[in-house]
Amino acid sequence: MLARLLFALALLTLLPSAAMADIFVWTDDEGVSHFTNVPSSAKYRLFIKERDRIHFRSGLCLSQPELEAYIDEAAQRYDIDRALVKAVIKAESGFDHRAVSKAGAQGLMQLMPVTAREVQCIDVFDPQDNIQGGVRYLRKLLDLFGDARLALAAYNAGPEAVMKHRGVPPYGETRTYVNRVLKYYSLFKEGTL
């Protein structure tokens, strides 16, 4: 299903008629998703607004030294331990700059479109832009909560969830995520990962 969805999105970015329009989706009783830029009935719901459209970069090849330089630059700029930045990237995307989650998070640091706009990330699939935006957002969360565990929980579940629960939310996914990032953080700090 995810592969078909990604194929449809990629195809829609290439079609001239759909390139400047909102995209709507309807999933039929058999689970088949139908995409269009001209909905023919009320069963279609908005999938992507034109202004939220992702602009894919083609032929991008990223070397390890380039990636390390982008991480170092952002970590230094926003005063965050580079090992923590690497841990978030490892947990979020496994260092795949083209990663897209089923929830719609994108790029190395898995920025949601709203968050990407908030942190002024123009091209979520550009590793440097994505890392700068993700680290900028992480810095904001660290400043807001003053604690790495809470900032990581907010990165995963949203700051509102952390505030509502006055701590790490009781969501299995979020608790697992925080522990995974902290484990990777420790391993990157030790140099064993």
Image (cartoon, rainbow, N blue to C red):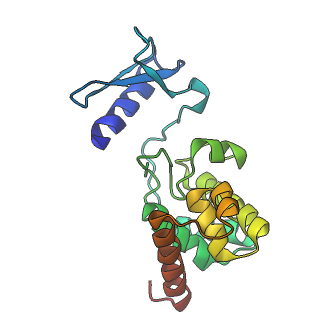
In the image, 105: left or right of 12?
right
Can you name the residue that lies furthest to the bottom here? 190
Can you name the residue that lies furthest to the left here? 30
- As rendered, which of 116 and 169 lies closer to the eye? 169
The image shows residue 162, relative to residue 113, as above or below, that is: below
Can you name the residue that lies furthest to the top here? 40
Q: Can residue 135 be seen from the camera position used here?
A: no
**Placement of the C terminus among the 4 image quadrants:** bottom left
> Where is residue 16 drawn, in percent x and y?
45, 17
Residue 4 sits in quarter: top left
Residue at 63 percent across and 58 percent down: it is 161
**Placement of the N terminus among the 4 image quadrants:** top left
Residue 68 sits in quarter: bottom right
The image shows residue 150, relative to residue 130, as above or below, that is: below
Count of marks placed on residues: 0
Residue at 68 percent across and 55 percent down: it is 160
Q: Can residue 180 be seen from the camera position used here?
A: yes
- As rendered, which of 141 and 160 lies closer to the eye? 160
Residue at 56 percent across and 26 percent down: it is 49
Residue 155 sits in quarter: bottom right
- As rendered, which of 10 and 178 lies closer to the eye? 178
The image shows residue 59, relative to residue 40, as above or below, that is: below
The image shows residue 23, relative to residue 188, as above or below, that is: above
Residue at 48 percent across and 62 percent down: it is 92
In the image, 25: left or right of 86?
left
> Where is residue 174 drawn, in percent x and y?
51, 65
> Where is residue 8 drawn, in percent x and y?
34, 30
> Where is residue 109 drawn, in percent x and y?
55, 59
